[in-house]
Image (cartoon, helix red, strand yellow):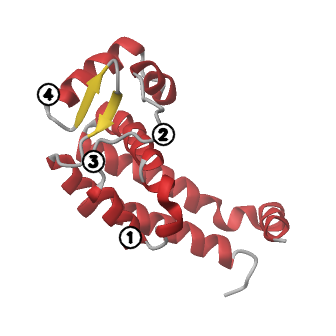
Amino acid sequence: MIRKEVEAKLKDNFADFWVKILNHNVFRTQILCKELGPLDGLILQVVAWHHYLSSISEVKSDIHSFESALKMWENKKNKNKNGKKLTISLVSELTAIPFETTRRKIKKLVNKQWITYSKEKGILYNSESELNEKIVKIIHPAEKNLLKEFLVAFLMSGKNS
């Protein structure tokens, strides 16, 4: 039922909300690059995605609110329970940044202690670094607001108010 409603909104009211998802993508990237550095922001986006997948999504039955997800994010240590390591090659592929540039950037992020890297464990987010403060206090709230604007536009699409 929900899928049919979504499909109908996509078909009939696309222009009412599409600009908001574009805004989300552009302004989220802008925030990441401003706070973390242009290429670093793209790389750390993938590292954060992997961190989320290997932590919060594994216990999603206990995590429902933004605040509880954020708390889990902050408390997550480098324990990759799902065994899927994040490699430099994968980060390069997902960001479309050349491998050698990605490798050099990863090395710099390790030196900043924002991430750790080993061939055995791959790339891991360091939730105890100064980076976490930026993610929790600046980036996550901005992402939440951008997502809210998209969802409101989507839900209100096709209505005359």
Q: Position of residue 133 (x, y in %)?
A: 19, 56
**Mark pair 4, 1: CA separation:** 30 Å
Q: Position of residue 115 (x, y in %)?
A: 25, 35
Of mark 3 and mark 1, the one earlier in the sequence is 1
Which corner quadrant of the image does residue 13 belong to?
Answer: bottom right
Q: Nearer the viewer, mark 3 or mark 1?
A: 3
The residue carrying mark 3 is 77
Mark 2 crowdedness (10 Å alpha carbons): few <14, some 14-19, many ≥20: few
Image disc number at residue 82: 2
Image disc number at residue 111: 4
Indicate the amino acid at tag 3.
Answer: Lys
Indicate the amino acid at tag 1.
Answer: Ser
Q: Secondary structure at mark 2?
A: loop
**Mark pair 2, 4: CA separation:** 26 Å
**Mark pair 1, 2: CA separation:** 21 Å
Name the residue at 27% across, 48% down. 77
Q: Secondary structure at mark 3?
A: loop
Q: Nearer the viewer, residue 39 or 17?
A: 39
Image disc number at residue 68: 1
Name the residue at 48% across, 24% down. 90
